Amino acid sequence: MAPPAWWAERNVVTNAAADDYAALNQGQLKNFVRGAVDEMNAKLPGGAGTALNNLVAGWRANAGTADDFAAANVGQLKAMGKLVRARLVELNLSVPPLGTATTDDDDNFGEPGTLRQDKHR
């Protein structure tokens, strides 16, 4: 399946081959969410909404002060995905159903995330 065009347009991905099973870092996660927020602001009525815009504004204001090369964990990845998904639901847009959660599904803040999980979350 081809990625959405906005991923390249918003510099979320490049044409370079990526190792989808490589560890995801916090800067990559932020870049992906920033791209999604910019795309939502450009194309959706009401844009990305207050929560997402405030989150990204905080990142932009603190650029260079965070350790963006630190590993992003699955819990952080899920938290970002939930914010984006909540906004789409709020706008009554069609979103695919979430998978069935396991007992430890919401408690993986110690498990490192991967690039593949970021793309598919």
Image: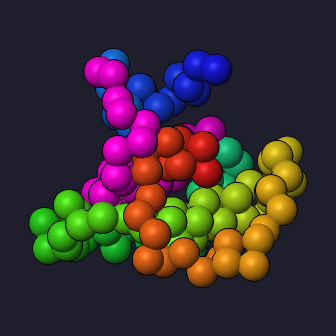
- Please indicate whether residue 26 sits to the left or right of residue 83 in the image: left
Q: Nearer the viewer, residue 102 or 66?
A: 102
- Please indicate whether residue 60 sits to the left or right of residue 2 in the image: left
Q: Residue at x 19, y 73 (%)?
A: 66
Q: Residue at x 64, y 20 (%)?
A: 1
Boundaries of the magenta span: 16-43
Vertical placement of residue 27 versus 82, above or below: above
Give percent across and percent down for residue 28.
Answer: 33, 51
Vertical placement of residue 42 versus 79, above or below: above
Q: Residue at x 30, y 64 (%)?
A: 71
Give percent across and percent down for residue 63.
Answer: 19, 65
Residue 36 shows in this picture:
no
Residue that sits furthest to the left in the current view:
64
Q: Nearer the viewer, residue 81 or 114?
A: 114
- Please indicate whether residue 1 sits to the left or right of residue 70 in the image: right
Vertical placement of residue 21 versus 3, above or below: below
The answer to whether residue 23 is magenta is yes
Q: Nearer the viewer, residue 40 or 27?
A: 27
